[in-house]
Image: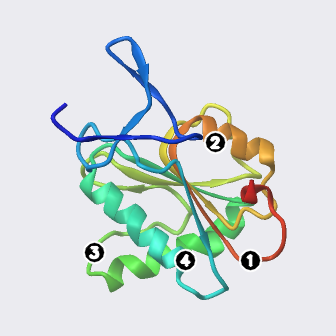
Amino acid sequence: TQKKLYPVYDKFLGFEIDGIENYFYIYEEGEHSYYRYKYIKHIGSSRSSKSWSIEEKAIRVCETISNSRVTVWRDTRESLGNSVWKDFRKIFPLSGRKYKFPKNTVPIYFGNGSMIEPHGDDTTNAHGITQDIAWLNEPYKMTKDTFDQIDQRANQIWIDINPSGKHWSDD
């Protein structure tokens, strides 16, 4: 690659180059880039635009990077449909995007092969689901075991949470 390599510190994913174990991330965005940060946690009060901002970022990732898979997780599929998915239905027309949403909470497909996919911790087994980005929306009731399964199979994890006391995501 002709891209600039940057050193990576503890707790970042490593990878091999030419059989030698090096720990680097490629910072610039591009076809062969690695995400600079594995975990991004958004903390803020209710109605502080955490979810809307993350939704817009998820849409932009899917619009600009072909074959991206962004999964959105919440404690139940029903609560996901009543919160995040309702916001997606509002954001698309407000931003001038045209997308016809069915009544059900089903994946949002993009013309370049990318998708934003809904998952409830109550209906989806996190074992085996591979994703480029996993967004854990207010994962208060999600177990650490579910997170560990998602963590093993995601390139990057976004968490948005209201400050409410100690949570496993603090670790």
In-image side of 137 versus 158 (left or right): right
Residue at 67% x, 85% y is 45
Cα distance between the residues tagged 2 and 1: 22 Å
Q: Which residue is mark 3?
A: 97
Q: Which residue is mark 2?
A: 150
Label 2 sits on a secondary structure element that is helix
Query: Are dots 2 and 1 in contact, CB under 8 Å?
Result: no
Cα distance between the residues tagged 2 and 4: 21 Å
The residue mark sitting in front, 2 or 1, is: 1
Front in this rendered view, residue 118 or 106? 118
Q: Amino acid at mark 4?
A: Lys
Cα distance between the residues tagged 4 and 3: 20 Å
In-image side of 129 versus 113 (left or right): right
Of the numbered discs in the image, which one, if any, rests on residue 121? Answer: none
Q: Amino acid at mark 3?
A: Arg
Please tell me how crowded label 3 is: few (under 14), some (14-19), or many (20+) other residues with Cα within 10 Å. few
Residue pushed farthest bottom? 47
The residue mark sitting in front, 3 or 1, is: 1
Query: Are dots 3 and 2 in contact, CB under 8 Å?
Result: no
Q: Which residue is mark 1?
A: 163
Q: Amino acid at mark 1?
A: Pro
Please tell me how crowded label 4 is: few (under 14), some (14-19), or many (20+) other residues with Cα within 10 Å. some
The residue mark sitting in front, 1 or 4, is: 1
Q: Amino acid at mark 2?
A: Ile
Ranked by sequence position, the earlier of labels 3 and 2 is: 3
Q: Quadrant of residue 79?
A: bottom right
Cα distance between the residues tagged 3 and 2: 30 Å
The residue mark sitting in front, 4 or 3, is: 4
Ranked by sequence position, the earlier of labels 1 and 4 is: 4
Q: Which residue is mark 4?
A: 50
